[in-house]
Amino acid sequence: MVRMAAALFAVTLSALWTVSSCDHTVDVPIGAIFDGVQSDEEKAAFTYAVEQINADKKILPQARLIPRMETVDNGDGLLVVEKGCSLMAQGVAAILSSTSCSSNLMLQSVCDVMHVPHIFVSRDTCDVTPDTKYTLSMNPAAFEIDKALSDIIRQQRWRTMVVLYDDELAFSRAEALLLLTRGLVPEIVLLRLPSLSNGSNTRVTLPSITEDPRNLFKHAVLLSTVENSISVINEANQRGFFTPEHHWIIANEAISDHKIKAMNMSKGQLTVARRRIPETGYASDFLKYWNSLPTNLTNDTADSVYDIKMTALYMHDAVLHLAQAVYALFRNRQWIGPNKLRCSLDVSLPWPGGALLMKEFKKQSDDGGVLGNSIFEEAKLHSSLSSKLKTLAKDGTGKLIDPTWDSWWHADIISEENFFEEMKRKSGIKGRTFRVVTLQEEPFVFKKNEGVYTGFCIDLLKELSAMLDFEYLIYEGHDGRYGSLQEDGTWDGLMKDVIEDEADFALGAIPVTPDRERTLDFTRQFMETSIGLLIRQRAKKADWLTIVKPFHLKVWLCTIAGFAVVSVALFLLHRTGSSEDGENVVRSTDDPNLADTIWFVYGTSVRQGGGISLRRLSTRILTGVWWLFILIVLSSYTANLAAYLTVTRLQTPITSVEELLSFGSYTFSALQRSSAVHFLSGSDEPSHQHIWSLLVSRNNSLVNDTTEEVERVKEGSQALVGDVPIMKHLADRDPSCQLSVIDFTTRSYGYSLAFQNGSQFTEVFSLAILKLQDSGRMDELRQRWWPGRSSNCPLHGSLLNSETTQLDLETFAAVFCILIFGLVLACTTSLFEALCRRSRQRAEMSKGKEAELNGDLQMGKISSNTKVSPGVSVHREDNGEIHIHVSPPERFPPPPPTPFHLARTYCECCGDTKKNKDSPARRKYCFCSSLNQEEGVWTTGSTATSVDTATDTVQNPVDFTTKL
């Protein structure tokens, strides 16, 4: 509170001192910061302005300016801030500066915090912080110069243009120039120069380019410093880029008349767009003062005010406007003397009089200065700019002339939409009916069955008519040609109708050629194209054996043989090892047979594992060697298959002229009215010359009707030369999809609408076409007539195909055949196994009943009243023996499964018997049968039971023993 009260007391005292001192001379300190020796001219202008104002009491009566100047070296931003704070501590009312852009930005921040007005003059184009309230730039907004520049380009009707810039701010100007010339210049190239400040002694050269610089730099605009612009122009002049056809424009207000005259130009045209300086008393007085300065400061005597450095004029006017603002505050009794401020925020408050002084400074435009009236817009830039042109005479005399030009701009800010509407208004196109001449050429213009015109160009004409509010009448050309320059200097075709004013403009696939461009005006290109060949695609052969191609037949045979040998060897090694373990050992059910071994070897070959256990070292060695072998085979197969498929996919159809000519069996024809004829006749490429020689040597090679030529192309020995869009349309329309297009040139050109030279409608039509392209509507129209990927026929339209090639079904046909064969074989085997299993089950069921009956009889469970099956007779002897007679073909009891894994023994039986197997009850029961007899005896100790049977085996030893 104490600090704020002290500040208010100081302000009140300052105001009282101001009122009481109105009758006395008041000192108004103003500060200035200059950047070393590079700002000597600005420093001299500042000193002169202060002296003149103090000497002329009409400008600032009852007061005088007290200059306080500081100098920094090398654009040190921190030092600039330190000097600024030092000036604020001395109580200055404003700070004027002429330093680098980075230093100015730092000083802006400090002055904005302390509410001290900051007026800066920059050697380069510097930005002003958008949210600052206390900083103004005396340099004009670049947009003001660019508006005048766009007027020059519009008046010159340039078709191509190169824009050279040297830093980021110049690039912003280039972007603004592109916006201002939208639809006016179809082709614009941006090239960057090394970024150097004004005053630099480094020589800048033109960037390296691959195109012919004579054509590329035909029309050029320089958005760079004065030194860079002069260096580039001198180099272009030495390299012969300035002929009567070359026109360059320098858009830099800092270039003087002396520097323009010092350029040793040849016969080219050079135009300088800069600020117009009015003839006033301030200007004449300043010119006299400037010539009185030492020549080491000004470098040369100024013949006019344009020879004075522009930043010095800005500094003079900044001091003048500041003095006028101070006097206005004096007159209105609003002047508040400046405080001695310190840059520490904890010590001092901002100066309350800074806002009033800055507001009044912006109003000083009535009296003007050396440069005339000054107006500062919200952009904080000097925006009152009246442009002036200076053109160097083409005769090489160095004389400057003032060309005439009309300013198109009538408003400070014109949006893109307002720009388009204003162009429509100025051209007078609304409600006008145009006569349009055209030719039929699908898919651009052709008639339907009803006689109505349709096509891409007709759709484009309808869109333009809706946008520009005009009507049209279409008629066809008389001779069926687009038009070319004849030997007698006249034109034929559509160009003749436009030149002779029979048509307002020509519509169709009209290429823009140099001869046509020199005679007519063309709009912005609505389609880019090049020259292409229409050929028949080479037939793609289906290869069902792709999967076996990685290996030779001998390799496959050896691999299969190795598989068989290893399978048999592994089985024998396993069996041999099992036999050596002992003769009395019965083989386990887990011992593999030959089929199990083959399945094991196959499973390991396809990396699926095996199902047998390898216990012996010999089998493990063989299996390990097989695994290593099959690993190498599978890895090699995988790598070779991938390589084979890759090479196969790279074998695309013919995609180059050289490849086509290598066959030697092709003949060529061309569309007579296409640009291909003119291009091939003048091309230096050997392949192009060869095609042209083939065209010339063959009769009727130049055709107008494509129907018969397309049929010849389908036969495979013909190639049709023409514009790529027409060739693609012919290939896309072919239902058999046999045609392909080769784009074999790097030279591109475009189709445009042709108007009379100097027509006022060219620009508005160009802008309308540009709006259609920006909105995407042009792409929609193009998609309608050239479907592209949505078409049924894929087109090979370039030498390089960036799309991923996929494997088709024919390549994998053999794989699917193997799969289908496996499925069919598995299903057939399963059906056969089911039939065999059912037959075996029926046999086993019938034999099971007999076995059950046999068991009951053996256990004595069958009495005389027991019912038995037919064919079986049973009777009991007195000694307890039971005799059963089974009639053939039934055999009882059923045989057991083999092998029967128990020790082999001999049983004691009556009569001549044969050896049988023991039961599982360790010889508790023994069954024997006589040779050549259907009878056997069961014995249990000393008791035997006679049984009629035809076998000596049992079906289930366990059940058999239990039933006993």
Image (cartoon, rainbow, N blue to C red):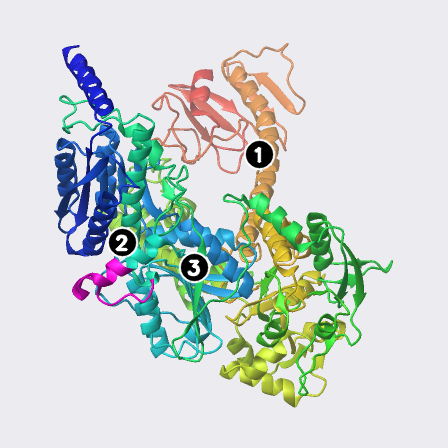
Total label count?
Answer: 3
Q: Residue at x 45, y 65 (%)?
A: 647
Q: In which quadrant will I find the C terminus?
A: top left
Where are the magenta residues, as a range?
288-304
The amino acid marked with disc number 3 is Leu
Mark 1 and mark 3 lie on one chain; the one further toward the N terminus is: 3
| Residue 124 magenta | no
Label 1: few (<14), some or many (≥20) within 10 Å? few
Image quadrant where residue 363 sits? top left
Left/right placement of residue 256 relative to residue 425 reads left
Observer-nearest residue: 58 or 419? 58
The amino acid marked with disc number 2 is Ala
Q: Is residue 133 visible?
A: no
Mark 3 and mark 2 lie on one chain; the one further toward the N terminus is: 2
Observer-nearest residue: 249 or 609? 249
> Is residue 946 positioned above or below 209 on the image?
above
Image quadrant where residue 243 sits? bottom left
The amino acid marked with disc number 1 is Arg
> Is residue 958 positioned above or below 80 on the image?
above
What separation in Å lies between label 3 and label 2 (alpha carbons)?
78 Å
Instruction: Give how far across and how far down residue 824 sits, in percent.
Output: 59, 46
- Mark nearest the camera among 3 and 2 is 2
- Mark nearest the camera among 1 and 2 is 2
Label 3: few (<14), some or many (≥20) within 10 Å? some
| Residue underneath mark 1 | 837
| Residue underneath mark 2 | 312
| Residue 292 magenta | yes
Q: Which mark is residue 641?
A: 3
What separation in Å lies between label 1 and label 2 (alpha carbons)?
114 Å
Instruction: Give how far across and how far down residue 201 sits, in percent.
Output: 21, 65
> Is residue 266 positioned above or below 299 on the image?
below
